[in-house]
Amino acid sequence: MESNLQNFNIPRLKSVFFGDHDMNLGNDILIADVRYDETLNFFRYPCRFDGYMVVFCIGGSLTLDVNLHSYKIGENSIVISLPSHIIRVADVDEQHKESLRCMVIAMSKEFISGIHLDFASIFNESRRLMDNPVLSLEGEELDVAKDYLKLAVKILSSDILSSKKEVLSSLLSSFCYAVGDSWIKKINKVKSDYRPSQQSQRLNSVFEEFIHLVTEYHESQRNVAFYAERLCLTPKYLSKLIKQVSGRSAPEWIDSFVILEAKNLLKYSDSTIKEVVYRLHFPNQSVFYKYFKAHTGMTPSEYRRS
């Protein structure tokens, strides 16, 4: 289990973070106060959370791998993990490990879908979060984020509120809009007065649904026709829409997920290449070797040795 990709959901995170300092609302949301202890060992190996996760570093620093790219997470940094992200704690600053403290907010996909949040619009077509998962806060932005976090903790800890889910839904919706605004400014991708057209919103919606499907089925399905059928579109039209929205074709997105999964298995697991071939539903090793080399310039064996 430790050497292979681990999949987490809210119930499993609750078992990992179990303690008096952790707060949760059933299987919808969990807020955990994480320090430097044995809990971090669960995340020394790659894992994927089946939902949305916000990690707010309050003190200390660590190196976090997101989709095999390393990011230095310092004090007052926020990391957002999407359902498609593979994350791993790569390193912790030993000299300041006692001061390490992160607040983790984990939300199920069902909870996010229920708060009527235009996630794609907030984060300027949220695919950019795949390339920009870390945000450093300062000044008033930092104060606002901390206030949101304190209020969320207070609501979860309260015994007087009978409708915590509804209250938290509104609060977290507001928080996402606030953080999303800061994110857009930081990555400087759109103007502050950006308003997506109705057509743009439709395209973004198709793209988000496509990415969700690829996240779920990429290990076994690499054919665009499969995803097009799920979205009630023709393969040609789906490919045109995905290219128009993201600048990358549908097959390129599918291949990127498959290659990421293959790299992760080759880098972190003890699985044989034959087992990787079976896991990713390739017909044989020869096909997998050609596919992997065409996309990486190396054979699976060469990548593993490197």
Image (spheres, rainbow, N blue to C red):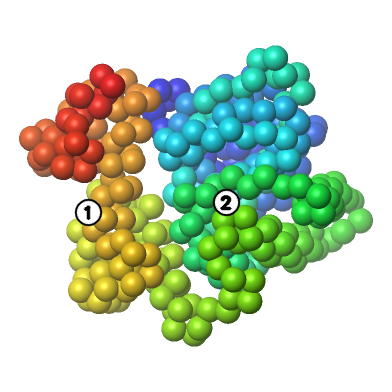
- Residue at 22% in and 63% down: 224
Q: Position of residue 115 (x, y in %)?
A: 65, 67
Quadrant for residue 121, please give it. bottom right
Residue density around tag 1, few if under 14, some if 14–19, many if 20 or more, within 10 Å: many
The image shows residue 90 at horizontal and vertical percentages of 52, 25
Q: Does 58 sit above or below residue 197?
A: above
Q: CA distance from mark 2 to mark 1?
A: 25 Å
Q: Secondary structure at mark 1?
A: loop
Q: Is residue 44 left or right of residue 3?
A: right
What amino acid does circle 1 point to?
Arg
Q: Secondary structure at mark 2?
A: strand
Front in this rendered view, residue 182 or 258: 182
Q: Judge left or right: residue 301 versus residue 91.
A: left
In the image, taking residue 34 as reference, residue 11 lies left or right, namely left
- The amino acid type found where label 2 is placed reads Tyr
Q: Answer yes or no: is residue 187 visible.
A: yes
Q: Which residue is mark 2?
A: 52
Q: Position of residue 89 (x, y in %)?
A: 55, 28
Residue located farthest toward the right when viewing the structure as drawn: 160
Is residue 31 depicted above or below 189 in this figure?
above
| Residue indicated by mark 1 | 222
Q: Residue at x 70, y 19 (%)?
A: 97
Q: What residue is rendered at 51% in x and 61% in y? A: 126
Query: In the picture, residue 225 is in which quadrant?
Result: bottom left
Crowd rating for badge 2 (residues with CA inside 10 Å; few <14, some 14–19, many 20+): many
Circles 2 and 1: CB distance less than 8 Å? Answer: no
Which residue: 57% across, 37% down?
12
Q: Is 237 or 22 nearer to us in this picture?
A: 237
